[in-house]
Image (cartoon, helix red, strand yellow):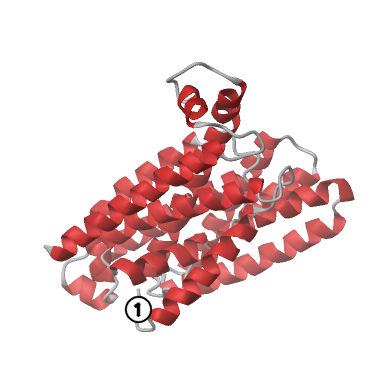
């Protein structure tokens, strides 16, 4: 019972932190917004210029940041369990590389934002299908084969990205680099990411007991009745789809999917029934706060949000890892 109360308390605190991060994102900016402006933007008062800025610009961006942070954290937590490696991250299967090739190719061709996002998703989906198809091979599919295939595909995508950057004109190079480091300035449609986040949790949480058993090893999971041949591909595809959606919306934001699940695991343990929702809330709060800092710390200029996630996440990761050296095997 104490452990259950502790888990519920942790989720409650993280939910409050997520709401607070969104509130800060709505209020902070070059044009300060009061609590009345925020309430007016959310439909509870007289519309002002600040309220319009909050409604039209800050609210979609904050929701997109929260949803994509949650998706990356969810994908990272699932990958760490399936690969039984606490240092696995959502990009280990080359999904980010495929999205980068698709997005940068669209930017190089001068296509509009909608087609850039479409190119990113198409590239991520193509990389996912390529990795799973090659890893299947003659039917002897293993997680080691999948991991090695993902590494090779990611390396190939990295070479294509370097080629695109080397031939890109100077007036498009800055936008490409910002996309590669993560950029939420064009995230004006958060609903696909929010819907997928809800669906992802709805699929992953019922399987959390089986994931707990799978974390002990495949043989032990099979002996206890876990349908490993069906579960593993389903969870891999869920992680791949979550990563593709997040990368399409925000660009290649690093460290969220690696650091957040590991920190949550060190703090509250490795029970997937608690870890998965806690990681989603923590990842959403982290990316939302990082994006708020990215657009305000040197305003009116904006920093790539991936730089801020690294500056926030890495020291926290090293600090907690030093305090809990035995924590967190997946």
Q: Residue furthest top?
A: 46
> Residue at the spot x=31%, y=61% of the render?
275
The answer to whether residue 144 shows anywhere in this view is no
- Residue 292 relative to residue 299: left or right: left
Image quadrant in which the N terminus is located: bottom left
Q: Position of residue 82 (x, y in %)?
A: 37, 68
Percent coordinates x, y for residue 232 in the rendering: 34, 63
Q: Residue furthest left?
A: 1
Which residue was labeled with disc 1?
A: 327
Res 154 quadrant in image:
bottom right
The answer to whether residue 23 is left or right of residue 30 is left
Give the class, few, some or many, for how many residues have Cα within 10 Å of label 1's Cα (few <14, many ≥20): some
Which residue is painted at 55% across and 24% down in the image?
51
Residue 302 percent location from the top left of the image: 70, 47
In the displayed structure, would residue 72 be above or below residue 198? below
Give the position of the C terminus as an image quadrant: bottom left
Task: Please indicate whether residue 82 sits to the left or right of residue 122 in the image.
Answer: left
Residue drawn at point x = 58 percent, y = 47 percent: 292
Q: Is residue 279 above or below residue 194?
A: below
Q: Position of residue 179 (x, y in %)?
A: 68, 51
């Amino acid at each position: 019972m104490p452990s259950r109360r502790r888990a519920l308390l942790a989720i409650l605190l993280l939910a409050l932190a997520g709401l607070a991060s969104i509130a800060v994102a709505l209020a902070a900016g070059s044009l300060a917004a009061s609590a009345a402006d925020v309430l007016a933007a959310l439909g509870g008062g007289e519309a002002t210029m600040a309220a319009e800025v909050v409604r039209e610009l800050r609210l979609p961006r904050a929701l997109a940041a929260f949803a994509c942070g949650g998706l990356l954290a969810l994908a990272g937590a699932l990958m760490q369990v399936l690969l039984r490696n606490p240092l696995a991250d959502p990009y280990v299967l080359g999904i980010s590389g495929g999205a980068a090739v698709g997005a940068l190719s669209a930017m190089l061709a001068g296509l509009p934002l909608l087609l850039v996002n479409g190119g990113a998703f198409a590239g991520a989906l193509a990389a996912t299908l390529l990795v799973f198809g090659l890893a299947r091979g003659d039917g002897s599919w293993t997680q080691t084969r999948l991991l090695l295939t993902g590494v090779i595909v990611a390396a190939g995508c990295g070479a294509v990205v370097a080629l695109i950057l080397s031939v890109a004109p100077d007036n498009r190079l800055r936008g490409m680099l910002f996309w590669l480091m993560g950029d939420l300035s064009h995230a004006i449609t958060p609903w696909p990411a929010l819907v997928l986040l809800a669906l992802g949790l709805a699929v992953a949480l019922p399987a959390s007991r089986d994931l707990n058993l799978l974390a002990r090893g495949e043989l032990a999971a099979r002996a206890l009745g876990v349908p490993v041949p069906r579960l593993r591909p389903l969870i891999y595809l869920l992680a791949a789809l979550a990563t593709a959606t997040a990368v399409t919306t925000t660009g290649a934001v690093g460290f969220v999917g690696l650091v957040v699940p590991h920190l949550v695991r060190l703090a509250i343990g490795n029970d997937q029934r608690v870890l998965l929702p806690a990681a989603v809330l923590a990842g959403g709060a982290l990316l939302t706060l990082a994006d708020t800092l990215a657009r305000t710390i040197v305003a009116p200029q904006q920093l790539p949000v991936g730089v801020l996630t690294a500056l926030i996440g890495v020291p926290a990761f090293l600090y907690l890892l030093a305090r809990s050296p035995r924590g967190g095997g997946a």
